[in-house]
Amino acid sequence: MFSSKSERLFTGMIATVLAVSAVAPVITVGAEKSSKVVNEVKGNVQAIEILQPTQQLVFKQGEKITGQDKHLMVKVGNQVRQQPVQWTNLSTDHIGNHVATATYTHKGKSVKLEVPYEIKGYELSFMHTNDTHASLDFAPKRATVIQQLREENNDRLLVDAGDVFSGSLYFNTFKGQADLALMNYMQYDLMVPGNHEFDLGVETGHPEFAEFIKNAEFPFVSSNVDYSQDQYLNELYHGNVKRNPADGKLYEGIIKVIDGKKVGFFGLTTEDTANIASPGPIQFQNYIEESEKAVKAFKKLGVHQIVAISHLGFDDNPAIDNDLELAKQVDGIDVIIGGHSHSRLDAPVVIHEGEEPTVIVQAYQYGDFLGTLDVTFDKDGKVVAHNGKLIDVKSYTADPTAVSILAPFAAEIETIKNTEIGAVATAAFDNPRDAGNVLNPSVRKNETALGNLITDGMLERAKQADSEVVAAIQNAGGIRAPINAGPITTGEVLTTLPFGNTLAIMSLQGSELLAALERSVSVYPIESGGFLHMAGMKLEFDSSKPTNNRVVKAQVLQGGQYVDVIPNNTYKIATNFFAAKGGDNYLEFKKAYEEGRVNDLGIIDWEIMRDYLVKLESVTPSVEGRVVDVKQ
């Protein structure tokens, strides 16, 4: 394939061929055999033929063949010359071969040639990332891969499926602006907001996310989010489909013309954001209903290639939302570029439901991989072929310009990272994940020494504020990184607890506490960000029992002894303010918050952990049987 202006001349008896598309060929002219004259020119009985080409003549999909001037190298007798022709017909010959009719004038007479061609389809190509979480160490290497892929195909789109925010010192310090500087340099084309883009919300809106959007040199698609009550984001949002989207804006959907073909893009953010982030005044709408509206709107505008940029999760809880359900329930979506579940899809997944297949991709997490996807459509916009993979960027050489962009941010982060707080870990405090194998341990389903350390610090600080506090709990999804053996640095503490949550005290009925503990272990042995680590409390559960009937024994520490939780008693429990407001779908905590039974102390979680470590001076990992599965 050539660019639209390419023309190469080969010596001797080899053909010169002009191509018109670098990305989306549909009709390829120039088969293995030569094409003979259909209508010979009167007065000239010499054979006229198209020489066997070494390159292919390409018509892109949707191009009107009639009247198009193209050049072929033809042989008239013993003479070879470049001959302009007009294509007037595409048809099938008597033995079923596809043929194109080329017409030109020779000595005042019309000559027609039948040339075999191949139907291939319109091609659309992507690069994609998701859930990078401000992990920028390998970003300059990603820039190198992106540049190389663009050299092969300059029409390849670069898309992010959300959660650039939260998870590292870069975010804690620069609130997304370090990430954005690199994304602008890499020339991202589109992004959908993830749930963590709403972590920093206040009651009136999201100033940091608004600043991120304003400075972006690309648009955002956000189709199931209501920004009308957010004082910062409302002015950036356009609630319709835009043909010529501006950078630094949020859109219901956009249409991009790629190689002469209209392609529709819309974006989805998990409705669970209302439970797992801090959306403030922002409302999230049903993803199926909004997707159906988007597909209908695009098709009404004559758009048949439709792409969803999704932060729903590949196979997350289907009762809430996920990409698999989206593909099954909404017909007309050709491609889903996903995020949220941190799924490593080494090859695209194709769902065959309804009239058309849907291709789903996702590129794991933390910028370790750059995803690629090439999709071929037929003339009606149906996916007929695809090819995709994940590229491990760590093996590539860093892009020098990207390194220089990151350098001033990295220098400041390095200073913070290396500042020792005055405490030592005698051994590493691990933060395991099960990598999809339920037999492996995970911070999101098992007691860990790190979870114990964090909640011990929370409990001590909460008791200083209110002596009636009996226990502390921490949702596992808020524990993001391990602590290495040796001197502990500020950077390690910040990376372990990166969200800047504040400490809160809840006043709960025993029945509410028991219901929350049931919720904590409801999906065990599957990982859950809502799994609770605890101090001043012990839990025994039986995973062989049905959900909501698994708690065998729950006790709190009172008067130096562990005693059973009584449903009618009242208990003061410390947690982070995110969980206290009902985060991770803790409806019991949400009810207490709405009823005024939550007191936010305003003390930042990582500072609590730092101060607790400094007080202890030396810490040793210990798992104490605080959460135990007693299944026989």
Image (spheres, rainbow, N blue to C red):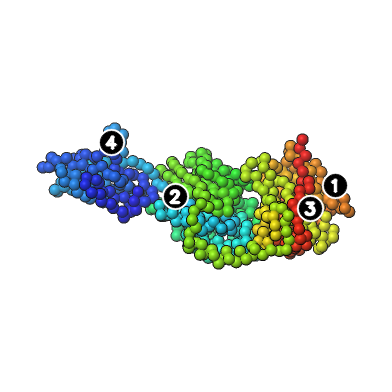
Query: Which callout, 4 or 3, points at the residue further toward the start of the chain?
Result: 4
Which residue lies at the image location 72% right of the left edge and 46% below the top edge?
446
Count neighbours of disc 2 (C-alpha within 10 A) and say few if under 14, some if 14 to 19, many if 20 or more: many
Residue 380 left/right relative to 206:
left
Which residue lies at the image location 30% right of the left edge and 36% below the top edge?
97
Q: Decide: marks 4, 1 in contact (CB < 8 A)?
A: no
Determine whether 126 is above or below 423 in the image: above
Q: Decide: marks 4, 2 in contact (CB < 8 A)?
A: no
Q: Decide: marks 1, 2 in contact (CB < 8 A)?
A: no
Q: Which residue is mark 3?
A: 535
Q: Which mark is residue 121?
A: none
Tell which of 24 and 135 is nearer to you.
135
Query: Which callout, 1 or 3, points at the residue further toward the start of the chain?
Result: 3
Q: Which mark is residue 125?
A: 2
User: Rounded to the nearest whole Å, what is the CA distance between mark 4 and mark 1?
Assistant: 85 Å
Q: Which mark is residue 564?
A: 1
Count neighbours of disc 4 (C-alpha within 10 A) and say few if under 14, some if 14 to 19, many if 20 or more: few
Residue depth check, mark 4 versus mark 2: number of the one nearer the observer = 2
> Three-letter amino acid code at disc 1?
Asp
Query: Which callout, 4 or 2, points at the residue further toward the start of the chain?
Result: 4
Tell which of 46 and 136 is nearer to you.
136
Q: Which residue is mark 4?
A: 93
> Three-letter amino acid code at disc 2?
Ser
Query: Which callout, 2 or 3, points at the residue further toward the start of the chain?
Result: 2
User: Rounded to the nearest whole Å, what is the CA distance between mark 1 and mark 3?
Assistant: 15 Å
